[in-house]
């Protein structure tokens, strides 16, 4: 199962609900404890391991949503599911091209820094996830 995300023919449709859950880490509001518990419970009930979930966060969700951390255009309460799916699918497709790889390389410093902006909440979700019974 650990290699499932690395398979070229992997059907990302299984990831859509996880992407939506992980996108909560990129909203403009402070995540309360009950929201973190909800995220941990929902993520625990998926078919993915914690390692796979973190890989999805860092390689699929974060590269698309990290720009939202710069936004000052009011409070976002959610990301529309279809738009999120399309954006991540487009990103994953773009990464196959030279242009996509160059763009990924150029934005790396900001993406790396912006990971620190969501890392505290992600660490809290991980701890709650690990405390949950299988």
Image (cartoon, rainbow, N blue to C red):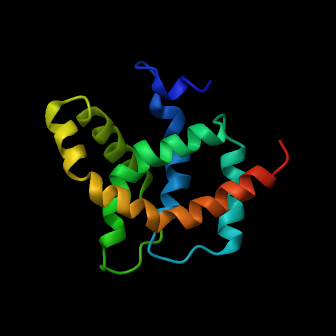
Q: Vertically, is 126 above or below 116? A: above
Q: Quadrant of the N terminus?
A: top right
Q: Quadrant of residue 89?
A: top left
Q: Is residue 7 left or right of residue 39?
A: left
Q: Residue furthest right?
A: 133
Along the line of sight, which residue is nearer the eye, 20 or 133? 133
105 vs 82, left or right, is left
Name which quarter of the figure residue 33 lies in.
bottom right
Q: Position of residue 53 (x, y in %)?
A: 57, 43
Can you give x and y, in whole percent of width and height, for residue 103 in the image?
19, 45
Name, please, the residue furthest toward the left. Answer: 99
Where is 31 relative to 87, above or below?
Answer: below
Viewer-closest of 71 and 86:
71
Residue 73 shown left or right of residue 116 in the figure:
left
Q: Residue at left 28%, top 51%?
A: 108
Tell me the residue at 49%/48% (across/down). Answer: 57
């Amino acid at each position: 199962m650990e290699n499932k995300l690395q398979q070229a023919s992997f059907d990302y449709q299984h990831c859509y609900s996880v992407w939506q859950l992980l996108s909560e880490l990129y909203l403009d509001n402070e995540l309360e404890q009950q929201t973190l518990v909800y995220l941990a419970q929902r993520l625990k009930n998926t078919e993915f391991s914690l390692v796979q979930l973190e890989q999805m966060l860092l390689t699929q969700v974060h590269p698309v949503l990290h720009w939202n951390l710069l936004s000052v255009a009011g409070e976002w309460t959610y990301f529309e599911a279809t738009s999120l799916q399309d954006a991540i699918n487009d990103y994953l497709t773009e990464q196959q091209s030279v242009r996509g790889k160059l763009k990924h390389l150029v934005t790396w410093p900001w993406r790396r820094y912006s990971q620190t902006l969501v890392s505290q909440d992600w660490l809290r979700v991980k701890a709650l996830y690990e405390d949950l019974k299988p």
